[in-house]
Image (cartoon, helix red, strand yellow):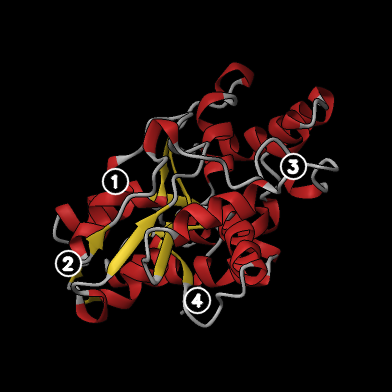
């Protein structure tokens, strides 16, 4: 399947239903690339007309802003806004809650006003509108616990769409002892992804992984590439790689969907 950039699509006289904002992790991280591929396959199955920015997509600026470098953030954000506005983009879908939060809530004050959806919200819409069919299959009756990404859940109150997808799999959702508004961070937010924990403190991702393991669910689902990385590291630390899988909701739905 050939994925068109927005410039290529416009050159063919067409305009996409959505722009898929891939994000830095989804573009470069080997594990996150699998999430990107799963979401693209879902879009293809649902016959969604979409395009990417390709080389014109830059970092959303989230890490710079969280690290306190407002100048760098504004440079990155305004560069992206200039590109998006030049193509008259109105609707963006991303699989990264960090990009989702930044573009949705922080770009408007810089002149970037768009409808921004997280991929779990858009997948839920595709199922509700019967553009995508999902059956439980291998996930039917299995226990799945869900980790709320901070920038999706607590920051933007998106709690139901991800859980609705698990229900569509006919799986048993088992909540961790802290979830939704009280969910514990994976440890990657606020640019912490790129630094070591302070000496003497238990690493946050290890503590969160322990909460997930206490549910006895063989699958830990999330909707963020950074959370996926942190939880995978936690599973390795706990030596549970053979027993527990960390999967993005797009991967779960893609496996359970059919045309």
- Residue 65 percent across, percent down from the top left: 74, 29
Q: Is residue 153 visible?
A: yes
The residue singled out by tag 1 in the image is 161
**249 relative to 183, above or below:** below
The numbered dot on residue 192 is 3
Q: Earlier in the sequence, mark 4 or mark 3?
A: 4
Query: Secondary structure beneath disc 3?
Result: helix
- Residue 25 percent across, percent down from the top left: 65, 58
Within-10-Å neighbours for mark 1: few <14, some 14–19, many 20+: some
The numbered dot on residue 115 is none
The residue singled out by tag 4 in the image is 2
Q: Is residue 226 left or right of residue 166?
A: right
Please identify the quarter of the rendering in which residue 75 is found.
top right
In three-dimensional space, the C-alpha distance between marks 4 and 2, rounded to whole angstroms, equals 32 Å
In three-dimensional space, the C-alpha distance between marks 2 and 3, rounded to whole angstroms, equals 35 Å
Q: Is residue 247 left or right of residue 195?
A: left
Q: Earlier in the sequence, mark 2 or mark 1?
A: 1
**4 vs 2, front mark:** 2
Please name the residue shown 41% across and 60% down the image: 221
Q: Earlier in the sequence, mark 1 or mark 3?
A: 1
**2 vs 1, front mark:** 2
């Amino acid at each position: 399947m050939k994925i068109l950039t927005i410039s290529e699509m416009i050159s063919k006289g067409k305009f996409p239903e959505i722009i898929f904002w891939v994000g830095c992790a989804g573009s470069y991280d080997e594990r996150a690339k699998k999430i990107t591929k799963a979401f693209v396959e879902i879009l293809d199955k649902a016959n969604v007309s979409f395009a990417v920015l390709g080389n014109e997509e830059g970092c959303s600026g989230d890490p710079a802003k969280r690290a306190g470098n407002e100048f760098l953030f504004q440079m990155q954000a305004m560069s992206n806004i200039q590109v998006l506005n030049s193509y008259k983009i109105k609707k963006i879908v991303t699989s990264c809650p960090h990009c989702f939060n930044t573009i949705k809530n922080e770009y408007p004050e810089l002149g970037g006003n768009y409808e921004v959806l997280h991929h779990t919200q858009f997948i839920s819409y595709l199922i509700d509108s019967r553009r995508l069919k999902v059956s439980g299959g291998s996930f039917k009756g299995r226990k799945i616990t869900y980790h709320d990404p901070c920038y999706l859940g607590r920051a933007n109150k998106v709690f139901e769409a991800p859980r609705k997808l698990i229900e569509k799999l006919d799986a048993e959702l088992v909540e961790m002892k802290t979830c939704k508004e009280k969910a514990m961070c994976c440890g990657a937010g606020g640019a912490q992804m790129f630094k070591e924990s302070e000496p003497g403190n238990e690493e946050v991702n290890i503590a969160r992984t322990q909460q997930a393991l206490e549910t006895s669910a063989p699958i830990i689902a999330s909707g963020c590439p950074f959370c996926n990385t942190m939880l995978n590291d936690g599973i390795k630390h706990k030596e549970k790689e053979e027993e527990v899988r960390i999967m993005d909701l797009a991967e779960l739905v893609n496996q359970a969907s059919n045309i």
